[in-house]
Amino acid sequence: MGKKIILTGDRPTGKLHLGHYVGSLKNRVKLQDSGLYESYIMIADQQALTDNARDPEKIRNSLIQVALDYLAVGIDPAKSTILVQSQIPELAELTVHYLNIVTVARIGRNPTVKEEIKQKEFGASIPAGFFIYPVSQAADITAFKASLVPVGEDQLPMIEQTREIVRSFNNIYGKEVLVEPEVMVPDSTCARLPGTDGKAKMSKSIGNAIYLSDEPDVVKKKVMSMFTDPNHLRVEDPGQVENNPVFTYLDAFGEDKETINEMKEHYKRGGLGDVKVKRYLNEVLQAELEPIRNRRKEFEKDIPAVYEMLKQGSLKAKEVASKTLKEVREAIGIEYFK
Ligand code: TRP
């Protein structure tokens, strides 16, 4: 019995932030270090290009930033394979085969794609490549015969659609070529980290994110200006802990649960000021981010080595993907020439 295979990844459209960290990076490092899995972690630059065709430089620059973020949080190339999606053209061919067994209507019903189309304000100009990215994501996952996909909860519809494609493919071609993946989302209630402005999601485009690479003074500034309970005007007023991002972050990152619970009770009663809570949160975040930032700076000293690591990972991944592609072509019956 081989190890269970994991495939996961991120679109490189900027640096990674705390939302990525609690949403999936932490999980990936834990899974990696358990030694029970064979992990592939994909920098999905091709997917990022689906709505950035006119700005490839942004994706190119983000690619190395995301690679550094991965290394900084503890993804270890000796244990996990980090790969670059665009370097594996087999994935594109798999996508083309899967597109034939998916309907436009089904993609149009994918809630994540629907939401993004609205958010990105494409109007009548949705890039076709963007629209079909759930299918290319199915190619990513199935190429490695992954049985586990650790991602943030916004990715659930993608995995659901992948599972459908796998079932259709195996059913149509009468062979168990593809593997149906399971999804793994963080179990904590703070898996979806709100932005520093209290908005539902931390996001680069909204400008409410704390980045893994932010310098200490930047982190502090962002924490001290965080949204809290808008009705907590004076220190002595009773405050609300629910939907108060300062406390959500403390739940997500604080280790000293007793102190945090005491603070919550005090805040609810009244008499505990926002500034004090924020100062404490700042300490907690600085402690979490310092080793990450330091590791990042070490890896930054040798960028060519980071590219070499990505190259080796991509070469290894290409071998695996090309094996699956061959099986897919055989199942369809288009391997004409032996
Ligand atoms: N869709 C993911 C994101 O938005 C990136 C991604 C591409 C991915 N291919 C994947 C995630 C395969 C998990 C598995 O960041």
Image (tube, rainbow, N blue to C red):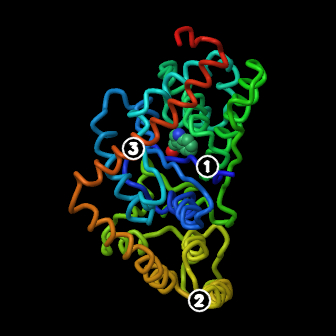
Q: Residue at x 55, y 57 (%)?
A: 199
In the image, is the residue at mark 3 within 8 Å of ligand 1 by its beta carbon?
Answer: no
Residue 191 sits in quarter = bottom right
Residue at which label 1 appears: 5
Residue 178 sits in quarter = top right
Looking at the picture, does residue 280 appear above or below residue 249? below
Looking at the picture, does residue 44 appear above or below residue 152? above
Q: Residue at x 57, y 66 (%)?
A: 30
Q: CA distance from mark 1 to mark 2?
A: 53 Å
Amino acid type, label 1: Ile
At mark 1, the secondary structure is: strand
Sequence-earlier tag: 2 or 3? 3
Q: CA distance from mark 1 to mark 3?
A: 26 Å
Amino acid type, label 2: Glu
**151 left or right, relative to 46:** right
Residue at which label 2 appears: 236
| Residue count near mark 3 (Cα–Cα under 10 Å), binned few <14, some 14–19, many ≥20 | many
Label 1–label 3 contact, CB within 8 A: no
Furthest toward the front, the residue is 338
Q: Residue at x 43, y 42 (%)?
A: 316
Q: Nearer the viewer, mark 1 or mark 3?
A: 1
| Residue count near mark 2 (Cα–Cα under 10 Å), binned few <14, some 14–19, many ≥20 | some
Residue 263 sits in quarter = bottom right
